[in-house]
Amino acid sequence: MRQSPDPSNPPRWSAAEVRRALRWGAVIGLWVGSVGIAVHAVGQYAHDGWIGADTHAYWLAARRAHPYQAPPRYVDAFEYSPVFAQLTRPLRLLPFPVCYILWVGVEALVYVWLTRGLAWRWRLPVLLFCVPELALGNLYGVFSVVLVAGVALPELWAIPLLTKITPAGPGVLWFILTGRVRHAVRAVACAAVLVAVSAALQPDLWREWFAYLHGNSAGAIDGILIRCAIAAAITIIAARTGWAWLLPVAFILCTPVNGGVSKDLAMLPAMIRLYLRPPARPSRSARPRRMSGVPSEVAR
C-alpha cells in the first residue's frame, strides 16, 4: 500500500537535481534574453534606418577623398585612422549591398568559429546575442579575433590601436603585466610601421584626422578616463589571476563611444572562448589549463 507524503517532512532535492534545475534555468534564461535582445535591437535598427549603418560608413569613407566630415554619433560618421580608410579602399568597387553581405558574412563566420565546442543549446543563444552587431556591421567580430588570437600574435592589436585607439590599452597592459614585454613592443611597432607607411602616402589625410579628433574629442569621449581606469584595474586582476576572459570586459570599457548593452554582447563569444581555453602562462612552471567551474554540459 502506497504511503501518502508526510507534509512535515517534504522530499529533498539531491545535489544532482539542484544542478540540473539551475542548468536548465540558465539555458531558458539565456534563450529568452538572447531572442528578446536580438528581436528588439533589429526591430529598432530597422525602424530608425540603421541596418548596415556602420558598414555603410566604412564603405562611404573608402569612396571619399576626405572621409572625416560627419561628427561622431551622426549618420555615416567615420572616426578611424587613415590606415583603416586606406586598407578598405577596395570596398568602393562593390555596390553597398554586396559589401554589407560580405562584411556580415565574415563576422558571422568569426562568431561560429569562436563558439565551436559549445553544445547547441548554449551556442545558438550566444550567437543570437551577436545579431545586433551583425545588423549594424561594426568591427566587433574583428576585435573578438584580436582578443582571442592576439595573445599569440600581438601584431593583431594594431587593429584596435588604429581604429578605436583606447581599447588597445588593455591588450598592451596585459602583455606587460604577464611578462610578455616583447609582445607589447611588437604590437606597438606594427602599428607604428603602418602609420609611417600611411603617412608617407597621404600626409594630408593624417592632418585631417588629427584635426577631426581634436575638434570632436569633448563630445566623443565623455567619461573615457574613468572607464579606462576601471579597465586597467580589471586588466591587472586578469593578469594576476590568469583570467584572460576578463579582457573583453576591459576592452568594452575602453571603447570611446559606448554602443550599448546589445552591441557589447557581441564580445560574449570571445569571453567564452577565453574562459574555456585560457592562454598559457609565460612561466615555465605554468601549463595551459581549463578554468575551474566550467560545467561539462556546456561543451560537447
Image: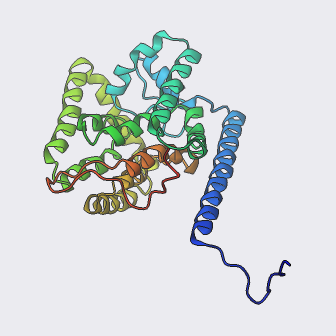
Horizontally, residue 94 falls left or right of residue 148, namely right
| Number of marks in picture | 0
Q: Residue 158: give x, y in percent of width and height.
A: 28, 35
The quadrant where residue 62 appears: top left
Q: Nearer the viewer, residue 78 or 274?
A: 274
Q: Residue 32: give x, y in percent of width and height.
A: 69, 51
Question: Does residue 134 lie above or below 2 as drawn?
Answer: above
Q: Nearer the viewer, residue 23 or 170?
A: 23
Residue furthest out toward the front: 1
Which color mode does the image show? rainbow
Q: Residue 261: give x, y in percent of width and height.
A: 56, 51
Instruction: Locate the N terminus by quadrant.
Output: bottom right
Question: Does residue 86 lie above or below 30 as drawn?
Answer: above
Whether residue 75 is visible = no
Horizontally, residue 115 falls left or right of residue 180, namely right
Whether residue 219 is visible = yes
Horizontally, residue 189 falls left or right of residue 150, namely left
The quadrant where residue 159 appears: top left
Q: Nearer the viewer, residue 248 or 288?
A: 288
Residue furthest out toward the bottom: 8
Horizontally, residue 17 falls left or right of residue 266, namely right
Which residue is depicted at the point 30% across and 51% down? 170
Which residue is depicted at the point 56% across and 17% down? 96
Q: Nearer the viewer, residue 26 or 90?
A: 26
The quadrant where residue 185 appears: top left
Q: Residue 171: give x, y in percent of width and height.
A: 29, 47
